[in-house]
Structures are given as C-alpha cells and as structure tokens.
Amino acid sequence: MKRTWGIEQIKLSPFYFNSLSLKYALENLKEVDGKILEIGCGAGAFARSIKKIRPDLEISGLDIDVKLVNLAKQIDSGNYYMQGDAHSLTFKNNYFNAVIGFDVMEHLNSPSLAFKEIFRVLKNGGVFHFSIPLEGSNFTIHGWFLKLGVKPKEKYAGHIQQFKLKDIVKMLKISGFSGIKYKYNGHFIFQFVDFFYFFLLSAFKLKPSHTIEGYVEVLPNNGLKYLLHGLKMLISFLCFYESKLLSNVPGQIGHFTAYKK
C-alpha cells in the first residue's frame, strides 16, 4: 500500500523519530562533498534536512512514485528530484560521491540488483549509507511473529522483504562493497509501538494514507493535533535515548555504511 511519506520535518533532536537516522547519515557524510543521490526519497524529508545542515552538497532525490516526486518539488526548491527506479539507475558509472537511502530496500523486488546499481554509480572511494529494518531478525518482535506467518507491515507498509543482518552484509559484499560497518536503533519501546500500530491496522483492515508523523503534520491546528504531537514527542524521546544506549545491541533498524574501494 502506497502512503505519502517524506512531508514531515526531521531534526537532530530526540523529539523526532528519525533524528538518529539523520545523525548517523551526517556523521558518515562528514568527509563527503559534491554530488549525493538519495534513493527512495519520497517527498524529500531527509534531503531537505541534510541540505539545511550541509548546504554545500548537491543532493538529487529519486523515487519510483511520481506523485511523491512532484510533491517534493513543490516543498523543496533547494534539491533536485526525479522519478526513477533503484533497480535501473539512469546515471553513468562513477557519478556520485555518496548514495544514501532510508527504509527503501525492504520495498524492492530485487534489493541485490539495487545494491549493484548503487555500486556502479558510485565513484571509487564513494560512500553508501542507508538504514533498513531488520524485521526477519530473531531480535525483533516482527521476527518472532514472522515465524508464525504474521507480517502486518507487508501489506500495510509495503515491506515485501524481511531482512536479517547477514542478508544485508552478504548482498553488500557480493555487490563489491567493503569496509562494511553498522549500528542499530529501534529497541524495546520502539518495537512494541511499531508492531502494535501495524497489528491494529491489519486487524481492523485500516487504510492509512500517511505515516504517523505525516498525520500529525497534516491535521488542523486543534486539540487533537497538539495531543498527538505531544504523545509522538514523548515516544520519540524515550526511543531516542534507549537506542543511543543500545546502539551496538541488535535492534529492529540497522544503519549501514559501506565503501566502493
């Protein structure tokens, strides 16, 4: 199911769900300049956030959904956005200094092909940084229920792949990447909230059109919006510090960095 995502704000603050993803991306882009590609950019939330902190970067955002690409263009004139398929990138070899992606690979029919394409368009010495849910892992609630055939995020979030850590490392190595490193977030509190939310969507056959953060953004300014915003900030705060303490302990989301050498 397609949902509108990428309209929300992301800041380096514990009150934002994706703040750690932004933090880790910026850390791994610290020595990078020039052209950057974000695959699966949606409406451009990460591209906009990175550009505010690193205005020197030339960021191109790519997404398969033309509606999201057009929305990104309306919201953000500071970056370049285009419609495209991560399985078959239309860029020449050795073109980008870095490629980034956030929660993309689990949506792809052939993530291994996308890894090979990313390797191809990266310059020698280029950085590939991405975050990805590890919902096939035995260290996650989703992984436990997967053994019972329960996959609520397959239909209600479009997660057609359920990865384990070894799956990602293997695909990166086969594609030619080296220097692979990773850390985690999404531990106990995050996993409970995430699984419970998608289990409810599945149980009641609801059809969300936005992410949780997106709903808060588009609600009119009333009491409900302020209540939900406060609740979101509280949960995000708890998840942030839990994951900072447990960044080397297996969690639901893996943050990977690899190099083309």
Image (spheres, grey):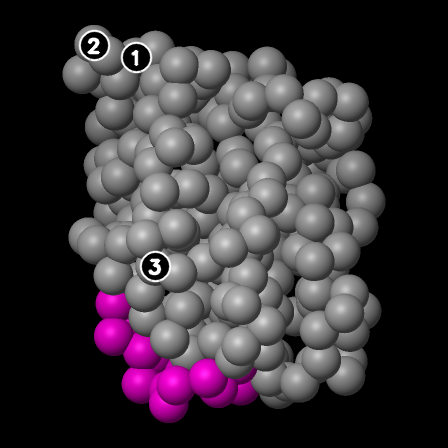
Membership of 89 in magenta stretch: yes
Q: Amino acid at mark 1?
A: Phe
Pick the front one: 137 or 93: 93
Q: Is residue 47 left or right of residue 67?
A: right
The range drawn in magenta is: 80-96
Against 20, residue 130 (above or below) is below
Against 53, residue 169 (above or below) is above
- Determine which of the numbered discs, if any, sits on residue 175 in the image: 3
* Residue behind mark 2: 148
Membership of 233 in magenta stretch: no
Q: Residue 22: x and y, percent?
A: 68, 53
- Determine which of the numbered discs, if any, sits on residue 145 in the image: 1
Against 202, residue 44 (above or below) is below
Residue 239 visible in the picture: no
* Cβ atoms under marks 2 and 1 closer than 8 Å: yes
Packing grade of label 3 (10 A; few <14, some 14-19, many >=20) is some
Q: Amino acid at mark 3?
A: Ser
In the picture as drawn, the residue positioned furthest to the bottom comes out as 92
- Residue at 39% across / 60% down in the picture? 176
Pick the front one: 229 or 63: 63
Q: Residue 244: x and y, percent?
A: 76, 29
